[in-house]
Amino acid sequence: MSADVLLGLQWGDEGKGKIVDVLTPKYDIIARFQGGPNAGHTLEFNGIKHVLHTIPSGIFHDSNINVVGNGVVIDPVIFKKEIDALKKLGVDVSKKLLISKRAHLILPTHRLLDAASEAAKGKDKIGSTLKGIGPTYMDKTGRNGLRVGDITTPAFKQKYDTLVAKHKQLLAFHNYEYNLAELEPAFFEGIEVLKELQHIDSEQYINKAMRAGKKVLAEGAQGSLLDIDFGTYPFVTSSNTVTAGACTGLGVAPNKIGNVIGIFKAYCTRVGSGPFPTELNDETGEKIRQVGREFGATTGRPRRCGWLDLPALNYAIMINGATELMMMKADILSEFDTIKICTHYKFKGETIDYLPYDIVDNAIEPVYIEMKGWKKDLTKMDNIDQLPVELKDYVAYIEKQTGVPISIVSIGPDRKQTIFMEHALVK
Ligand code: GDP
Ligand code: IMO
Ligand code: MG
């Protein structure tokens, strides 16, 4: 079997968690491949609303294995909280959650360094989630990092002390004040919880499972436009959020990747700093934010809102090789008489239909087409025949402009509020 990949095509928060939960019964293994607790993946079902940060979104199903892959960075403090919250809901992770020995650890000093770095950037800050993601990946590529496999070795404490000593020098360079003694007990408590879980060579585990015919779904975090290479650099995260990240973050070879499922909202949002061509700094943007409850699942920050951006979407589809699309939050656009879609940009005096390299320092102006809104409550519909014709037109237009079928239209946060379209590979 090959592994399917599910990831975000915009700036994150597209609704990946909801769809992974919906699709989990069709798979055997759900595996996170990058990012860390900067992610917030929301699941809603049976009146429960739950946000996951590091643990894959298949965890609520009983017959699936969830893997935290080598490409993920783990904060033991947040990880313990996630496990405690799941326990309260009666979810026992001990048999269905496996952690790669190669996954890197976020230390308390990584979080401090994230905050110090953002403070030093002043108005140019990235708008990081302050979870220590950047500094942890820096130590990974700098070959200084600590990994899950280290925590059960006698040298762990000494390796920890060596890295912390280095971090203290960097914090002194930043003149950053902190109280590490206050942060360390929770870290070491989290380490004890991590020790109790099953640590595996996840690349071996996943490849063996695929050879045995098991179906794997790789769950992405963040979004393609936050990718370290292809996103709106430097306003990006520190990992490869695109399909290629699933290869390096799980040890799945490129020729073993199957379907690539691209998740996008029917409009756009972004949290944190950086370019956002279709951003609406007006009443319409505010209306999308309020109706769509666009506030971060991890930090609570208001999300910036704007219309759907086709050049950016097509860019993400190209980089990922998306084979099918799923459109989220169609219900939020029910409020609008007319809906705009950006088809081109005006950039440096020309009209272009692609996302250029240098949008951080140059003005970019969206060119829109306008479509009639559907103005109907979608949230109680349960099949494609009930969808209003204007929504079907909206979907058909996007399919035509992207060349990729839309297999799911999501009409509410709940698992059940999911409409499978004709093209749905998973029904
Ligand atoms: P993720 O990071 O991609 O998993 O997305 P988040 O969980 O951060 O943000 C998506 C938000 O939209 C969550 O609050 C979801 O419960 C909610 N959501 C997902 N799909 C839909 C939908 O179709 N309609 C509505 N109204 N809300 C949705
Ligand atoms: P999910 O998986 C939305 C953004 C931050 C910031 C930038 C860098 O829930 O879609 P970082 O903490 O990674 O150094 O922050 O990336 N960001 C996200 N935005 N959803 C996310 O994850 C995000 N993870 C990071 O807001 O702009
Ligand atoms: Mg999120």
Image (tube, rainbow, N blue to C red):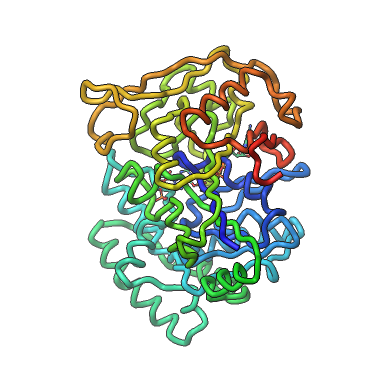
Q: Residue 395 appears at what percent x and percent y?
A: 57, 27
Nearest the viewer among 330 and 318 is 318
**Quarter that holds the N terminus:** bottom right
| Left or right position of 427 against 82 | right
Residue 47 sits in which quadrant? top right
The residue furthest bottom is 154
Q: Is 107 located above or below residue 6 in the figure? A: below
**In the rendered view, does 85 fall on the left or right side of 349?**
right
Q: Residue at x 28, y 42 (%)?
A: 122
Image point (69%, 34%), residue name: 419
Query: Does residue 268 appear in this view?
Result: yes
On the picture, is 307 further left or further right than 59?
Answer: left
Q: Residue at 65% of width from left, 18% of height from top? A: 389
Q: Is residue 125 above or below residue 249?
A: above
The quadrant in which residue 32 appears is bottom right
Q: Quadrant of the C terminus?
A: top right
**Residue 80 x %, y %:** 59, 64
| Side (left or right) of 89 relative to 84 | right
Q: Is residue 194 above or below residue 399?
A: below
Looking at the image, which residue is at 74% across and 39% down? 416
Quarter of the view holding residue 54: bottom right
Does residue 182 appear in the picture of this structure?
A: no
Q: Nearer the viewer, residue 357 or 322?
A: 322
Residue 277 image position (x, y, % from top left): 36, 28
Whole-percent x, y for residue 253 in the image: 46, 65
Q: Front-most of 156 and 408?
A: 408
